[in-house]
Image (tube, rainbow, N blue to C red):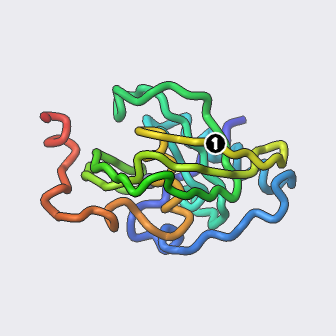
Amino acid sequence: MANISEIAQLGAPVLRLHAQMVTEPLSAQTRQIIETLQDTLATTQGVGIAAPQISVSKRIIIIASRPTSRYPSAPLMEPTVMINPAFQPLSETREKDWEGCLSVPGIRALVPRYTEILINYINQQNDLVEARLDGFVARVFQHEFDHLEGTVYLDRVEDNRDIFAESEYFKI
Ligand code: ZN
């Protein structure tokens, strides 16, 4: 039985909260949240999702870079569930590239992100995992991490001229 949630849309208060740490990564409640995130993401063309987007203010994200109609050139990776994720940049270098968000339909914008980051998180087996990410996957991670801080990608746009309607974005 799939557990599909509606996606919280920009303006929903839950997207502006600082999400709570997960204290019991192995609990039935945590497993239920993860299943709903997985099932909901599978119904979309997105490459990541964060628990606040299903109106759950907990620090859980899924990174699932894959080529989709929304992101045709995204690299393919195994979908990864990350509980209580954290990161630090490995260099000060940031690059602007296009992002969209399931909570902000119809819009794309250029967002500066660190190009190389060191991350850690708790996996579904309650192990602490450390990894180095770069490029598109590092971008997706930072986008989803922002959702746990109550930040949406439009907050990071440096110039309103960098915001495009999706229909115009697909022309370029
Ligand atoms: Zn988003």
Furthest-front residue in this view: 91
- Asked if 158 appears above or below 118 in the picture, the reply is below
Q: How many numbered badges does the structure rendering display?
A: 1
**Residue under numbered circle 1:** 131
Q: Position of residue 38 (x, y in %)?
A: 63, 40
Q: Secondary structure at mark 1?
A: strand
Residue at the (83%, 48%) spot, across then down: 126
Circle 1 packing at 10 Å, graded few (<14), some (14-19), many (20+), is few
Image side of residue 147 versus residue 83, left or right: left
The foreground one among 2 and 71 is: 71
Q: Which residue is located at x 31 percent, y 49 percent?
A: 95
Give the residue at x 67% y 51%. 120
| Label 1 near ligand 1 (CB < 8 Å) | no
Amino acid at circle 1: Ala
Residue 148 occupies quadrant: bottom right
- Residue at (57, 61) in percent of width and height: 52
The quarter of the image holding the C terminus is: top left
Quarter of the figure that contains the N terminus: top right
Side of 78 relative to 34 (left or right):
left
Tell me where residue 35 appears, x and y as whole percent: 70, 43
Work out whether residue 100 or residue 142 is closer to the camera in this orientation and state it: 142
The percent coordinates of residue 167 (x first, y second) are 17, 41
The vertical placement of 56 against 170, above or below, is below
Q: Could you say where residue 139 lies in the image, as x and y percent from the top left?
A: 43, 46
Asked if residue 167 lies left or right of residue 152, the reply is left
